[in-house]
């Protein structure tokens, strides 16, 4: 009994990233130990993975609605809403620009081996564009905005209007704001509980990812692509973003942010789901980096929705790899500029696709480019789970770094010692 209590205490006091890392190690080991060729085993792991993702996203919408409403009220009351919005969207555009350029430079400077052409025919092509994106932002009912579990922007808009509206008549809205603040704290506590125990579900999530990735990596065809994405990720994670933080925020310890990113990166990479990584991002930005809730509750969701530069980086690399597999002809400056602006623009409307957005963007890009490359995305369809994982990891890191930049520039943070990081 005493040993059981001691284990429970040690588990509860363990750093969050240690729990998640142990879960991933167990999951990867399970993928090699279990008879994954057995359909029943595959079905069970797939079901457990889906259940884990649902468990992790279960509290997301309540947390966002009450948190955003309260945050917008406080920011508008304190006359810092405009400044926060300015720095948020400047950072979103800047990070997307950096990642898109990095992706293009990587694939243009390093010529990866061609992918063998297949005779597979085009299947149904998804529709993605600004018109559909705008229409999805405003459902027919405001109540539908807080029911959609994938596209979070309608909930953000509805909650933002609720918070901003309370400022116009603070006396009448005081009971509402009091309720919102209490509900936000309660929902955050519940979310924290779910995140603590999501590590158990990450065993199934990482096991399923490894089962899928093993066959992709074993073929060897996509190994150069994986290596390029890994090098780019390390470059962004360990060099580009810390240097930006050092000079832009005058931070003498920019590598502390890397420590705060471990759990978000693990969650995003193995799930490939930006919505699952969002609550983890919220906790680390608020509790590890000391960003005030009125800032993090607004910036982290906006980065999750719009700052999909990782998807732009992956899409541009994959697209040029496809073009080179079909033809040995080079690229004109006009082609490179078209790829840059198109991938940049597409990344901004991927908010309704928390998982698999990079592959959808690649499909749309091939269709728009045409010239006989409409079916080019099929060459990389087998590797989609892996490169979408890298895109999600890039985007999770961007959300953490970007939210910190906005908090520093708007003075909405407090220093937290490294030993107190969760």
Image (cartoon, helix red, strand yellow):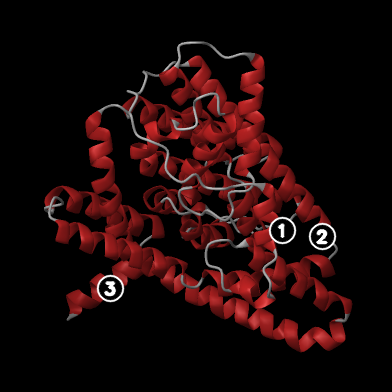
In this rendering, the answer to whether 246 lies above or below 173 is: above
Percent x, y of residue 293? 65, 66
Q: Earlier in the sequence, mark 2 or mark 1?
A: 2
Query: How many residues crowd mark 2 within 10 Å: few (<14), some (14–19), many (20+)?
Result: some
Marks 2,1: beta carbons within 8 A: yes
Q: Give the class, few, some or many, for how many residues have Cα within 10 Å of label 3's Cα (few <14, many ≥20).
A: few
Q: Position of residue 217 (x, y in %)?
A: 27, 34
Tell me: residue 92, above or below residue 295. above
Dot 1 falls on a residue whose secondary structure is loop
Element marked by disc 2? loop
Query: How far from the left and from the top, in percent, is residue 153?
Result: 64, 61
> Distance from label 2 to label 1 (Cα)?
10 Å
Q: Comparing marks 2 and 1, which lies closer to the viewer? A: 2
> Which disc, if any, is residue 412?
1
Estimate the x, y position of residue 47 in percent, counting from the top left: 28, 64
| Residue assigned mark 2 | 80
* Left/right of residue 410 with respect to residue 196 in the rendered view: right
Q: CA distance from mark 2 to mark 3?
A: 43 Å
Where does the N terminus fall, quadrant-wise?
bottom left
Rendering quarter of residue 169:
bottom right
Position of 104 with respect to 164 (left or right) is left
Q: Residue at x 52, y 67 (%)?
A: 149
Tag count: 3
In contact (CB < 8 Å): disc 2 and disc 3: no
Is 290 located above or below residue 345 in the figure? below
Tell me, yes or no, if residue 38 can be seen here. yes
Taking the image as shown, residue 212 lies to the left or right of residue 292, namely left
Q: Secondary structure at mark 3?
A: helix
Residue 72, which numbered label?
A: none
Q: Which residue is mark 3?
A: 8
Question: Which of marks 3 and 2 precedes in the sequence?
Answer: 3
Crowd tier of the residue under label 1, counting other residues whose Cα lies within 10 Å: few below 14, some 14–19, many 20 or above: some
């Amino acid at each position: 009994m005493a040993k059981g209590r001691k284990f429970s205490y040690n588990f509860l006091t363990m750093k969050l990233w240690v729990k998640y890392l142990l879960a991933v190690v167990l999951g990867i080991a399970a993928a090699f130990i279990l008879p994954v060729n057995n359909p029943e085993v595959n079905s069970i792991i797939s079901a457990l993975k889906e259940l884990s993702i649902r468990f992790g996203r279960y509290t997301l919408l309540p947390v966002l609605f009450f948190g955003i409403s309260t945050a917008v009220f406080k920011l508008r009351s304190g006359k810092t809403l405009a400044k926060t919005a300015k720095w948020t969207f400047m950072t979103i555009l800047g990070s997307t620009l950096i990642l898109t350029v990095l992706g293009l430079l990587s694939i243009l400077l390093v010529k990866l081996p061609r992918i063998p052409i297949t005779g597979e025919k085009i299947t149904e092509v998804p529709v993605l564009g600004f018109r559909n994106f705008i229409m999805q932002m405003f459902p027919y009912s405001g109540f539908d905005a807080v029911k959609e579990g994938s596209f979070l922007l309608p909930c953000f808009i509805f909650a933002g209007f609720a918070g901003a509206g309370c400022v116009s008549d603070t006396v009448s809205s005081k009971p509402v704001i009091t309720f919102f603040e209490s509900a936000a704290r309660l929902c955050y506590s519940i979310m924290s509980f779910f995140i603590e125990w999501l590590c158990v579900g990450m065993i199934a999530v990482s096991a399923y990812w490894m089962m899928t990735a093993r066959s992709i990596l074993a073929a060897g065809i996509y190994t150069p692509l994986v290596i390029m994405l890994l090098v780019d990720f390390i470059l962004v994670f360990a060099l580009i973003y810390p240097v930006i933080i050092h000079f832009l925020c005058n931070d003498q310890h920019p590598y502390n942010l890397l420590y705060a990113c471990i759990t978000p990166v693990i969650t995003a990479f193995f799930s490939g789901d930006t919505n699952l990584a969002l609550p983890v991002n919220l906790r680390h930005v608020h509790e590890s980096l000391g960003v005030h809730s009125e800032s993090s509750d607004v910036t982290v969701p906006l980065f999750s929705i719009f700052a999909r530069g990782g998807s732009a980086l992956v899409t541009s690399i994959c697209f040029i790899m496809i073009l080179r597999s079909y033809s040995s002809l080079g690229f004109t400056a006009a082609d490179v500029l078209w790829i840059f602006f198109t991938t940049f623009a597409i990344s901004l409307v991927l908010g309704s696709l928390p998982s698999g957005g990079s592959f959808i963007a690649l499909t749309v890009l091939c269709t728009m480019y045409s010239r006989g490359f409409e079916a080019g995305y099929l060459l990389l369809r087998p590797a989609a789970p892996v490169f979408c994982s890298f895109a999600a990891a890039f985007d999770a890191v961007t959300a953490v770094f970007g939210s910190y930049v906005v908090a520093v520039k708007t003075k909405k943070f407090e220093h937290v010692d490294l030993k107190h990081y969760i």
